[in-house]
Image: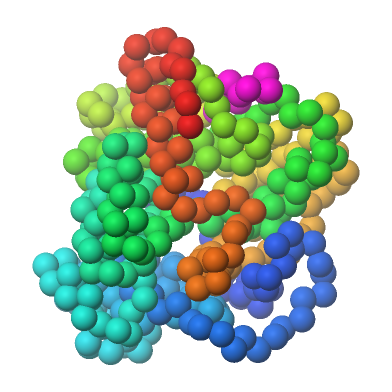
Amino acid sequence: MNSRRDFLQKLGISAVALQLAPALTWANTKNITEEVYDGPVLRVAIMGLGSYGTRVAEAMKACTKAKLVGVISGTPSKITDWQSRYGIPAKNCYNYENFDDIKNNPDIDAVYVITPNALHRDEVKRVAKAGKHVICEKPMAVNAQEGQEMIDACKQAGVQLLVGYRMHFEPRTLEVIRMRKSGELGKILFFQGQCGFTIGDPNQWRLNKKLSGGGSMMDIGIYAVNGSRYMIGEEPIWVTAQEVKTNPIKFKEGIDETILFQFGFPSGAVASCLSTYSMGNLDRFFLDAEKGFAEMQPSTGYGPIMGRTNKGELTQPITTHQTVQMDEMADIIFNGKQPVVPIDGYEALKDLKLIDAIYLAAKTGKKVEVSL
C-alpha cells in the first residue's frame, strides 16, 4: 500500500445514492427527502490531480452545492485527461507557474489544495493573494508556524481558509459526538486512537521529508490527534510521546515510522494513541466514559465507518465523505454555517501545535505542556 488513501477502505460511488442531505446535522433520520437546491454553487478548482484529488473530483459529481470547474497541475497530460473527464474548459486550467492568474478568473470561487504537505504554505498564500477562498488538505502545514502564516495570509486577503476534515461531517462520528455532548455517556475518562498501515514504495513523497514534513504522524497520525479532541470534547494540556524505528534505511532521519503519544485533558481524561507506517489493520477509535462507551472500526476510512456504543450498533446513513464535505463547505463559505466541529484554519492550527509537541516530547523524552 502506498498511502493512507490506499489503506483506508474504499467506498464505491454507488454509496452516493445514500448521500446525506447536508442540512441533516446529526444524520439520524432514516427517511431522507431529496430537495431541489436553488442556491449559490461553490465553483472549485482542484490543485494536485493525484489519487486523492481524483477521489474528491469523483465525489463532487454528486454535490448539489459545489462543482468542479477548474484544475491546477504540473502535468499537462493530467490536465487534458481531466478536461475530458469532467468537462473543464481550457480557460480554467492552470499550472504551478501561472496559477496566480486565477485572480482574473471570475468563474472560480475556491481552490482545493491537494499537494504534498510541505507545499501547502506557499500555495495557500498564493491562492489567497489571488483573492480566492482556500480549501487545504490536512495536515494544513508541516508545523504551527507555517499554519499561522497561512491563516494570516487568508485573513489579510479577506478569503476563507477551510481544511479537509471530512470526518467532521460523517454521520456516525457525529452521533457519538452528540451522545457525548448530551451527557448520555457521562463523564469522559479515556480515548484510544490507533492509526496505521504498512507503507509501500520507499521512494514516494510521503517518505521524503522535504515534501512530507514528517512521517506517519503527518499522514495518518493526525486523525488520532484530531479525533482525540472531538471525541473527548476538550483540548489537551500536556503531551508525552515515544518514537520507535525498526527500519532506519526506509524511514530516514525526520521520517517517523511509529510514534506512540499520550494527551492529558483538563477534566482528568487521558488519551493513548498510535501512529505507524509499519503495522496494518489499525483504524480504530475507542471512547470510554462513566455511563457508556463508543467504539469505531474503521473509524476514519473512506467508508463505511462502522461502530457501536453501549446502546448498540451505530446505524446512521453511510455517506460519501467528500461529497458531504464539499456541500457543507459551500454552506460555510456562502451562508456562514457553523459545523458541529470546526474545519477552519484555527482548528487545523491546534492540531499542528499538538504535532509539534508530540515530536518535541518524543525527542526529549519529557512531558510537554501545551496551551491551545
Q: Position of residue 173 (x, y in %)?
A: 67, 50
To which quarter of the image does residue 276 belong?
top left
Q: Nearer the viewer, residue 310 or 344?
A: 344
Residue depicted at x 34% and y 56%: 155
Q: Is residue 41 above or below residue 299?
A: below
Determine the residue located farthest toward the left in the rendered image.
97
Please tell me which residue is depicted at 28% across the width and 75% down the height of the picture: 71
Please name whichever residue, 320 or 330, is drawn nearer the observer in this view of the structure. 330
Residue at horizontal 66%, vertical 44%? 297
Is 265 included in the stretch rendered in magenta?
yes
Q: Quadrant of residue 43?
A: bottom left
- Please tell me which residue is depicted at 46% across the width and 12% down the height of the picture: 367
Which quadrant holds residue 34? bottom right
Point out residue 132 in the picture as x, y percentages from the top left corner.
Answer: 31, 70
Reply above or below: 140 against 245. below
Residue 277 seen in render: no
Residue 265 location, x and y as percent? Answer: 61, 24
- The magenta-colored residue range is 263-273
In the displayed structure image, the side of residue 168 where residue 99 appears, left or right: left
Residue 222, how many percent across, how many down? Answer: 46, 40
- Asked if the stretch drawn in magenta spans residue 250, the answer is no
Q: Nearer the viewer, residue 104 or 357?
A: 104
Q: How many marks?
A: 0
Q: Is residue 244 left or right of residue 125?
A: right
